[in-house]
Amino acid sequence: MTKKSNKETTPAIFIIFGGTGDLAKRKIIPALYNLFLDNRLPEKCAIIGTGRSKLTDGKYRTGLMEGINEFSRTGKADKDEWARFSGNITYQIANVNDAEEFKEFGVKIETLKDEWKKNPSVTYYCAVSPDLFCTIAENINKSKIENDPETTRIIIEKPFGHDLQSAKDLNKRLLTIFNENQIYRIDHYLGKEVVQNVMAFRFANAIMEPLWNRKFIEHVQISVTEQIGVESRGNYFDKSGILRDMVQNHLMQLLCIIAMEPPINFEADEVRDRKVDVLKAVKRILPGTIESVSARGQYGPGWVQGKEVLGYRDELDVDPNSNTETYAALKFHIDNWRWQGVPFYFRTGKRLYKSASLITIQFKDVPHNIFNKSEGNIPKQNRLVISIQPDMAISFQLQSKTPGLEMTLNTVDMVFDYSGKTKVDSPEAYETLLLDIISGDQTLFMRADQVEAAWEVITPVLEYWENNRMSNFPNYPADSWGPENAEALIAKDGYHWFNLPEKNKNS
């Protein structure tokens, strides 16, 4: 995807609802600032933060600069560069529930049009609680402010609904006001550099695609583990759980990238069509089989890096008798020609031993071992490991002869390591996604049918877990690898969970 230089780009207006919130401070403004430093923002650009707090433009900018200094990948803001960038930022107090107050945004947009002598793109960023998404969209419509189908976008953060029906309702309401090509549903995992590189790795290398099927691949693992607990998100998380919070979006999107068929081109809808095909092909889990293909857990108290930590039920704003899962492991099959019979294993959880996001593709055994049959000289299976975090790397584990007089086999890694091979810092996911929004490129954003298809896949498990309480919660201690039944889930098929080496342990 070739992006225009800033001189060629249409002027842009960003209106950030929730402009005083944590997401704006940690992610959105640092991303826009870094795009500015890289000369990627349009020369004519306005950022309007909104909130209910009474702030001057100067005080608002000062708060945002503190976020840059703490969270930006480029470090503390340069005084002169920040002055240039922050000149584009203004603050407007607004109640998102009052359509009348939206008319002021219309005045600002028209003023900027007259000043720039050119029509800008206008992006409404909903960095707010999900229950306000439709309210904002409907008030944009009621107040009759800018909504040109060609140049207006609305950004929706996850979660996209609480279940299948609420996702359908959300999509239906949004689509009465905006066209599908105006709606950008953000899943920041899709903006990560390594995740994007999987597409290049698969489809730009003749050596990979012939191996990418049931004939050569034994199984696939998608694993996103976290050392942290629920932190200050207890009120949200206890109504959600890890299945909604991680599996329905992040892990399902990673599955789509790994399992999709080659698109005929890199156009947004062509790529997204192939992703939807994957979700439609996932074999639906029948009610009587859920226990055999899933495992859930909830963390108890323990020690992490020498500090005592609370169990989930003792966390702030969590029900002391909560049945909410903080760990989920699942097994899926994709019912199509390429993947027939290949199991896909998901694992994700909080307060685990290591923070890591991995995709592991295990290839089948060699068909015949010609080497010494002693236990120490049996060839190990080839494995492709895609590390998204904490390290960004793609490694291929192969078998090689150990130097010496004997024919002794040893595993070696062929590694592409971003930290050692690139001279330029990799952009943060939000930088990539915001640049695509400015350019009007929807390739990395989810379409309505993709969101709903992902909900359809997990709905049987979601309903079963909600209707069948666990009597042994909490069932894994903090700083462990999760509950025993998760190990049993994969072990009964003859496999084990793959973990990064100890050097990559990350808090």
Image (spheres, rainbow, N blue to C red):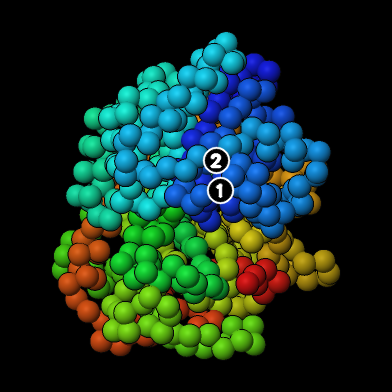
Is residue 394 at least partly visible in the picture?
Answer: no
Residue nearer the viewer, 184 or 68:
68
Question: Which amino acid is tagged 1?
Answer: Leu
Answer whether labels 2 and 1 touch (C-beta < 8 Å).
yes
Spatial CA distance of label 2 from label 1 is 7 Å
- The residue beneath circle 1 is 55
Tell me which residue sits at (64%, 87%) in the image: 306
Residue nearer the viewer, 460 or 173:
173
- The residue beneath circle 2 is 91
Q: Quadrant of residue 137?
A: top left
Local packing at callout 1 (Cα closer than 10 Å; few below 14, some 14-19, many 20+) is: some
Local packing at callout 2 (Cα closer than 10 Å; few below 14, some 14-19, many 20+) is: many
- Give the total number of marks visible in the rendering: 2
Q: Is residue 124 above or below residue 312?
A: above
Q: Quadrant of residue 10?
A: top right
Tell me which residue sits at (64%, 29%) in the image: 41
Is residue 20 at least partly visible in the picture?
Answer: yes
Question: Which amino acid is tagged 2?
Answer: Tyr
Tell me which residue sits at (61%, 59%) in the image: 389
Q: Position of residue 432 (x, y in %)?
A: 59, 38
